[in-house]
Image (tube, rainbow, N blue to C red):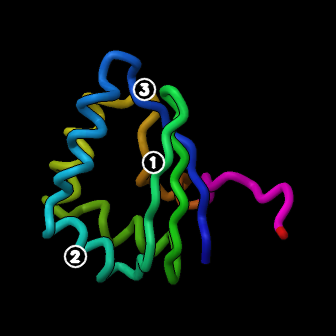
Amino acid sequence: MRIALHTRVREDRVAAYEEAHRDVPAELTAAIRAAGCTSWTIWRSGTDLFHLIDCEDYARLLAELEKLPVNIAWQTRMAELLDVVHDYSEEGAGAGLPVVWQL
């Protein structure tokens, strides 16, 4: 399945956000893949961040990552940089952007 998300980085933290993503912990990327994600791309326009995630099951992906210490540490770090964070709650599993058009 393909999920698109929108988050927002704090205006004064853009450089720190991009720097953090140049060194995502290998343990975290391995956990993301193990949870069924095959691709996760983030684009930035100003402070708006757009995520495109390809995974087997987005709700399962969130559930498997939510309690992992490496992800908790990463989300704590991201919370310092973001105005709108990635929602790991059960409600967040349905928070993807709706498809308007596709070719």
Between marks 3 and 1 in the image, the one whose residue lies nearer the viewer: 3
- Looking at the rendered structure, which numbered label has been put on residue 68? none
Nearest to viewer (mark 1 / mark 2): 2
The disc label shown at residue 87, or none = 1
Q: Is residue 99 a member of the stretch shown in magenta? A: yes
The residue pinned by badge 2 equals 30
Instruction: Of the two numbered discs 1 and 2 on the same chain, state the one appearing first in sequence.
Output: 2
Q: Which percent across, then down, holds residue 75? A: 26, 46
Q: Secondary structure at mark 1?
A: loop
Tell me the residue at 82%/66% (across/down).
Answer: 102
Report which quarter residue 13 is drawn in: top left
Up/down of 82 relative to 69, above or below: above
- Of mark 2 and mark 3, the one earlier in the sequence is 2
Frontmost residue, 94 versus 85? 85
Q: Which residues are magenta?
A: 94-102
- Residue 83's disc is 3
Which is more toward the observer, 91 or 43? 43
Image quadrant in which the N terminus is located:
bottom right
Label 3 crowd bin: few (<14), some (14–19), many (20+), radius 10 Å: some
Rendered location of residue 49, percent (x, y): 50, 40
For label 2, the SS is: helix
User: Residue, x 41% and y 54% (percent of image)?
Assistant: 88
User: Quick check: 42 left or right of 70?
Assistant: right
